[in-house]
């Protein structure tokens, strides 16, 4: 999922005037990470609807901010001793059994959570960047 920022030009210009390029990068990284935590909360909340042991919810992790071709991103995924990322993939996209498509209770839940949390993501990013002004 990618998010396009609009209306942040003023905040960005004020921060550029006040901070060095490195400090501005740290502020942006902090803001993006705060937004990613909001998305992970939304995914975790969505998992409550079909929770069994809660292991998939417990293994949600937020990665580090990476920059590629001038775009910053952060990954939200699953990592832990129970290796739930395999099961999460099957829950999200379904699978075939004996030639028939199986759609488990969690089918499409991650995409639904991401779509529903876009506003919270943008609010968290804006709030974190405004803290630095």
Image (spheres, rainbow, N blue to C red):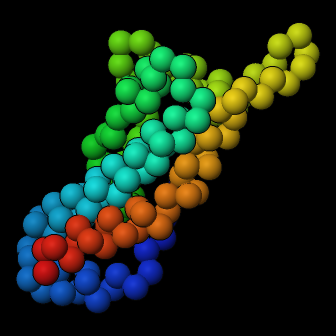
Q: Which residue is drawn at 35% across and 81% down?
A: 8
Please indicate whether residue 36 sits to the left or right of residue 47 in the image: left
Q: Which residue is drawn at 58% across and 57% down?
A: 115
Quadrant position of the C terminus in the picture: bottom left
Residue 46, placed above or below residue 10: above
Q: Residue at x 43, y 35 (%)?
A: 77
Residue 65, placed above or below residue 54: below
Residue 105, placed above or below residue 2: above
Which of these two is toward me, 40 or 67?
40
Please indicate whether residue 102 sits to the left or right of residue 13 in the image: right
Asked if residue 131 shows in the view, the reply is yes
All told, the count of numbered labels is: 0
Give how far across and how far down residue 131 sits, in percent.
16, 73
Residue at the extreme right of the image, as rendered: 99
Give how far across and how far down residue 122 sits, in percent.
40, 68
Which of the 4 image quarters holds residue 15?
bottom left
Please indicate whether residue 124 sits to the left or right of residue 88 in the image: left
Asked if residue 68 shows in the view, the reply is no
Which of these two is toward me, 35 or 26?
35
């Amino acid at each position: 999922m990618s998010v396009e920022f609009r209306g942040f030009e003023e905040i960005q210009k004020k921060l550029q005037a006040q901070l060095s390029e490195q400090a501005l990068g740290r502020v942006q990284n902090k803001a993006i990470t705060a937004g990613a935590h909001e998305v992970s909360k939304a995914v975790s909340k969505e998992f409550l609807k079909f929770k069994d042991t809660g292991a998939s919810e417990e293994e949600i992790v937020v990665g580090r901010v990476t920059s590629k071709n001038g775009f910053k991103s952060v990954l939200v995924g699953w990592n832990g001793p129970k290796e739930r990322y395999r099961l999460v993939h099957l829950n999200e996209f379904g699978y075939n059994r004996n030639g028939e498509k199986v759609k488990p209770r969690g089918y499409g839940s991650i995409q639904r959570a991401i779509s529903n949390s876009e506003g919270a993501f943008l609010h968290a990013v804006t709030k974190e960047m405004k803290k630095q002004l």
